[in-house]
Image (cartoon, helix red, strand yellow):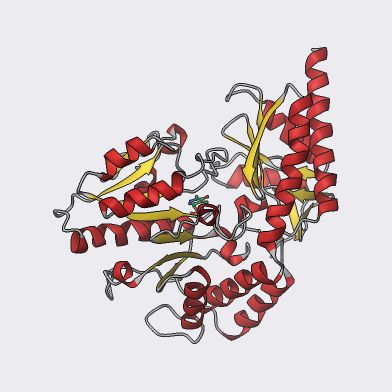
Amino acid sequence: MMQKVSSQQAMELENEYGCHNYHPLPVVLERGEGVFVYDCEGERYYDFLSAYSAVNQGHCHPRIINAMIEQTKKLTLTSRAFYNDKLGQAEKYVCEYFGYDKALFMNSGAEANESAIKIVRKWGYLKKNIPDNEAVIVAVERNFHGRTTTIISASTDEQATKNFGPFMPGFQVIAYDDLAALDEALANPNVAGLWIEPIQGEAGVYLPQDGYLKKAQELCKKHNVILMMDEIQTGVARTGAMLASDHEGVHPDMLILGKAISGGTIPVSLVLCNDDIMDVIHPGEHGSTYGGNPLAAVVTVEALQVIKDEKLVENSNAMGEVFRGRMQQLVEKSKLATLVRGKGLMNALVINDTEDSSTAWDICVSLKENGLIAKPTHGNIIRFTPPLIITEEQMNECCDIIERVVLEFESAMVEE
Ligand SMILES: *Cc1c(COP(=O)(O)O)cnc(C)c1O
């Protein structure tokens, strides 16, 4: 059915027949292996996006792919109308892996967040005695939790919200990284949950001040509010710890995962919490046709085991140090690259330009021409999130490329 196409043809087809909901960098990927992806003409690129951190284990990881192939030959989907032989084992595995009593498997990250919202609201009515339909979930500015109508109701990003109303009530959005605002908001007895990312990924890799998460957890305890941690992007070794929450020794009441828990194979997401919270959900009240399918169960266990077996937490941490060290040197001699920030292998380079300028985009196009793909997030910020299996030699080669391209840009700008 499918034919060999050129990069040009592939781009034309997407432009003509696909919804224009993305603005892709002009590169057409045909194959991936480890830290590399290849275009239709066979050009090789270092992948410094990793599908928004879904491919932490590297492209087409042989163990994950093999587990997937073996399971696809046996059974892929039963629906939860019946038991399957893999789901319970996967639930036990993820509960022990992350330290919770119960797991709910869903598919996309947005769907896991939607599920989390429902569970938390219901907990609020049953366990906190919030009056009917008055539960509030507190979110923070610049959050990114997905694209559904409910989720964007808590968004402060105009691009994500404009002309998509009416919006879902029941969210209060407060300033990020502001403990006084948090204490005040959580004091409202109708607040059931605090919904945050430990590091804001889509917003441009914003880190809170040290101690914010720990203090937020204390405030949640004080006000009897569920701490809902969206670690869909930061989780699974991305930030140099298994969870970004671990950096502050925080064990959230509710953990929301997606992206890399399936190593970039099929969409799998998870909500984890203890019995006192998860037990509010009864048969028939929530579900998903594909959620908890045996293929997802097998793939998730293998993808998470790879993280441990290949010591990707340690490598993420070590390679992050190399990256930020090299980028810090660049920042010191560059007027164009002004700041590097991040943790582990979740980093961003800030380009000294306005948010609506095309400089960061142009740099990314040039990086692509030099064999490395990355994308700007919010205008002048370039996010760098390579697969966590990257070696030190590869990392240094990539830093050479980034440094060369940024300095070339800078001298070209001076000449203008
Ligand atoms: C990507 C992401 C989501 C949404 O996941 P989808 O699978 O795209 O629905 C939610 N929260 C965070 C923090 C994310 O990075």
Q: Residue at x 39, y 84 (%)?
A: 82
Q: Nearer the viewer, residue 32 or 173?
A: 173
**Residue 284 location (% of width, % of height):** 28, 73
Q: Residue at x 28, y 51 (%)?
A: 222
Vertical side of 72 occupied by 405: above or below? above
Q: Nearer the viewer, residue 390 or 246?
A: 246
Residue extending farthest left: 131
Q: Quadrant of the N terminus?
A: bottom right
**Residue 161 location (% of width, % of height):** 40, 37
Q: Quadrant of the C terminus?
A: top right
**Residue 168 location (% of width, % of height):** 29, 45
Q: Nearer the viewer, residue 257 or 325?
A: 325
Q: Would residue 156 be found to the left or right of residue 243 on screen? A: left
Does any portion of residue 77 appear in the rendered image?
Answer: no
Q: Quadrant of residue 12?
A: top right
Does any portion of residue 117 appear in the rendered image?
Answer: yes
Q: Would residue 374 be found to the left or right of residue 272 on screen? A: right
Q: Residue at x 33, y 48 (%)?
A: 219
Q: Would residue 367 be found to the left or right of residue 173 on screen? A: right
**Residue 256 location (% of width, % of height):** 45, 59
